[in-house]
Image (spheres, rainbow, N blue to C red):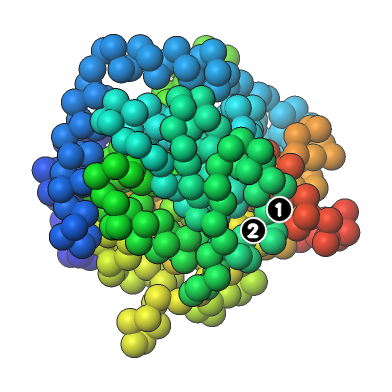
Amino acid sequence: MTDLSADDKAELLRQLIARELPDELGRFGPFGGRYAPETLMPALQRLTAGAQQLLADPDFQAELAAELGSWVGRPTALTPVPTLSARWNAEVWLKREDLAHTGAHKINNALGQALLAKHLGAKRIIAETGAGQHGVAAAAACARIGLPCVVYMGEIDMERQAPNVDRMRRLGTQVVAVTSGDRTLRAAIDEAFRDWVADPRDSYYLLGSAVGPHPYPYLVRELQSVIGREARHQILAACGELPDAAIACVGGGSNAIGLFHPLLGDSGIRLIGVEAGGRGEALGDNSATLATGRPGVLHGAYSMLLFDADGQIQETHSVSAGLDYPGVGPEHALLKLIGRVDYWSATDEQALAAVDELSAAEGILPALESAHALAGAKRFAREYPGSRILIGLSGRGDKDMPTLSQHEVGAYAHVAS
């Protein structure tokens, strides 16, 4: 996969921009596909056909747009941050997904898929969650459209994201603790798939990130691309020019692909995804899949993964529950392969320092996931002084207060990004 010519890479990028990828097999070049039990194939095929039909249906799009406007609160703001800009010697703008209903970008996808499920005749919704934001979004969306919802969440994530567990339950959703495996997002996805296998016709699996078997990476990308479309229009209106760089955090990769995909054809914009560097470079100490991973199959798709010499998927680490995942969406794997997006990493300490810096400088408390993008942006500003930087602020940090309260305010102010 490393011997692609410049022409091959240019053609794959053209196909991405033209929305010709994924292909009919769900492939993004060598990545993606549909690796799932035979019992799920009919459900996946029905979902693929339904998604393609409904996403092209003006009536469905009008229904979704109306809900995004009146219930979710779109378009979300594009906010200049003058104090941070002066400090970093850059022009910094935040795309404020933290202002969307439920507090993160996850609601864009959850609402879209919940509406899709209802149109396809589903009787119940299954979802998984790590940081809890997708679970909250799924719970809210299901309450809005009137479908019962069950959310699987790792036991460790339930402890560090307790406020979101309570929110899901108050929204009428059943939250199931996953005590097997690593007890984080990977285990939650495993359990959600098991549930779906048991009832593939009446249940709908509302997958939260741009991962999994086809059509999920495509479907999530389409529903999250509203972020990039809005941001592009907003920054042109505000500045008259596009940014020098657009930067977003990457776990599974839904908020990043939502920001990046509408900007792929703007060759002057440097696109940078920031993964969780955790506490070190050793396997198990981080979640930097694209930086240190190898290709393999996980949760129904061929992508980059973190596994050991025996092929065993490894437990990962990040201070941010939403980035704590050993895989990544197949479109991101392709974007790295063809060189259109650069993927960096930020450590736990850098992310914690970024939370404190943005909060004190601008009165905006970012999610720990989003703080990784801030750390990456600070690095970019240092390397390219005077640049215009667009940061995807994927969510707000209220959910992280149990984790943040364990760290003294300002304890990581000395950390260089």
Asked which quadrant contains residue 225, the reply is top left
Along the line of sight, the residue nearer the viewer: 157 or 288: 157
Residue 212 position in % (x across, y down): 32, 54
Asked whether, in this view, residue 6 is left or right of residue 356, the answer is: left
**Label 1 – label 2 distance at C-alpha:** 5 Å
Along the line of sight, the residue nearer the viewer: 367 or 141: 141
Q: Amino acid at mark 1?
A: Ala
Is any atom of residue 116 visible in this view?
A: no
Residue at disc 2, secondary structure: helix
Residue linked to disc 2: 158
Asked which quadrant contains residue 176, the reply is bottom right
Residue linked to disc 1: 162
- The residue at the point 88 percent across, 59 percent down is 408
- The residue at the point 28 percent across, 12 percent down is 59
Judge whether 407 appears above or below 80 on screen: below
Residue 28 position in % (x across, y down): 21, 49
- The residue at the point 83 percent across, 56 percent down is 405
Residue 106: assigned label? none
- CB-based contact (under 8 Å), mark 1 and mark 2: yes
Asked whether, in this view, residue 85 is left or right of residue 197, the answer is: right
- Number of labelled discs? 2
Q: Amino acid at mark 2?
A: Met
Q: How busy is the neighbourhood of tag 2: few (under 14 within 10 Å), some, or many (20 plus)?
A: many
